[in-house]
Amino acid sequence: MTLLDFLPSLHRAATPRIDPAIWPSTTTVDELGRLCIGDVPLTDIADEFRTPAYVLDETDFRHRIRGYHSALKNVEIMYAAKALLTTDVARWASEEGAGLDVSSSGELAIALAADVDPARIVLHGNAKPTDELHYATSIGVGRIVVDSCMEIAYLACEVRKPQRVLIRVTPDIDIHGHAAVTTGVNDQKFGFTLADGHAADAAKRILHQPLLDLVGLHCHIGSQVTDPTLYGESIRRLIAAMADIRARHGVILHELNIGGGHGVPYVSSDPELNLAELGEIIEDSLDWACAAERFPRPRVVVEPGRAISARAGVTLYRVASVKSQPGGRTFVAVDGGMSDNPRVALYDAKYTVALANRHELGPTQIVTVAGRHCESGDEIARDVELPADVHPGDLLAVACTGAYQHSMASNYNMVTRPPIIAVRHGRTRELVRRETTADLLARDLGASRIAVGGHH
Ligand SMILES: Cc1ncc(COP(=O)(O)O)c(C=O)c1O
């Protein structure tokens, strides 16, 4: 029996506010007030693997893909590897029936190392290097999403056997989101515009190449999209474009890839894309557009990244110092920052933070959780409520950090990158080890010259 068993009201007060819309689906709080994910107390992970550390809930990740399969019945799911990729993550995705969207030779190599079927991989990129195209075609990648006329020319020289390709088009749809992730409008670097017949011209160039097999169109309108009707509009515009290509060139394209960008909540008041509504809108707009154009129903593909991996991830930090600036804010500084989470500096992203090692009893205060890097903009979260007695040594958990954190991490200030620790059914597994200073020195060739021959 603990004190909390005698005092249920104390238990309520002691339970951190864990919003299930934001934290991994297996998150619980044990009787000591410790946050647990996958039945593993986060304090155990911090003790064993040190901090900062990325924790990944395998159950949550798999559960998100299953959610896609049940909400989007006739739609193929390609997990967008740019959100988070390790060989284990690639394997989980393919075991759950998802293909993989990759955007570099590195992502492709990891997918292949995980034994993902190359036929179920789509390669993206607005400036794919020629050696990347060579690698992708030689291993038989399932689809290449063509992004420029130059790429069509490169591919035509490169391929030795038939290669399926899609054309990336911009449907001129504005998601009214952050400029860095608004990719569906005409004035940005990706794809061919539907306007002025650019996409139809790209189709003509591809159709002239006997080994390039044009199977469909692709678009990606942006990230953090929460209005499903924008995808319905994309479908209508792309089916019209397919009908135009049929009229001009006499070919029927069978594949319609509407990209990813499905929005997830980072803080409790954030909206999220409702998958059931998305499923209905995809069906309705396909019915409508195909009937209007008398066009056969294509195979529909989606490429969610964030919506699969973001909520599976939590980042652990140790509090290093607490400082109240006179007339200013209180800063709780931690042992990581913009090198493991660049999204705050890049997109002004908001995050949810909780104390992970003990009960949040007593009065609270509003603080800024700051990183350890040499910039005043190096913040993890502003205006978060933490106990007034938060102190060095406390463990903080930041929710919804499974997407675009590890994959965008850097070595700013020569800080080494954190490990990724997977949790499931009470067990931990280290997917990616912590980077070491020796790793940094190994890439610095001057350092090895000094070690061998001294200074020159
Ligand atoms: C072509 C393409 N597909 C899919 C995605 C995944 O986006 P999200 O992780 O927001 O779902 C991106 C993201 O940049 C992308 O560029």
Image: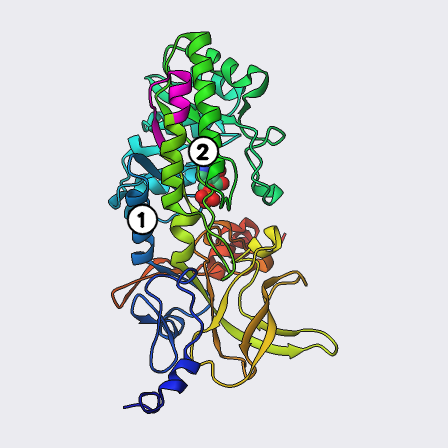
Marks 2 and 1 close (CB-CB < 8 Å):
no
Rendered image coloring scheme? rainbow
Q: Residue furthest right?
A: 327
- Who's the residue at 54% across and 55% down the image? 411
- Who's the residue at 37% across and 70% down the image? 45
Q: Quadrant of residue 31?
A: bottom left
Q: Amino acid at mark 1?
A: Gly
Say which of 108 and 193 sits in front.
193
What residue did someone put label 2 on?
A: 232
| In-image side of 245 versus 211 (left or right) | right
Say which of 400 and 448 sits in front.
400
Q: Quadrant of residue 135?
A: top left
Q: Position of residue 318 (x, y in %)?
A: 49, 73
Q: Amino acid at mark 2?
A: Gly
Q: Is residue 72 above or below residue 382?
A: above
What residue did someone put label 1 on?
A: 67
Q: Position of residue 400 (x, y in %)?
A: 45, 58
Q: CA distance from mark 2 to mark 1?
A: 20 Å
Q: Position of residue 23 (x, y in %)?
A: 41, 63
- Magenta residues? 288-300
Q: Is residue 437 visible?
A: yes
**Mark 2 vs mark 1: which is more N-terminal?**
1
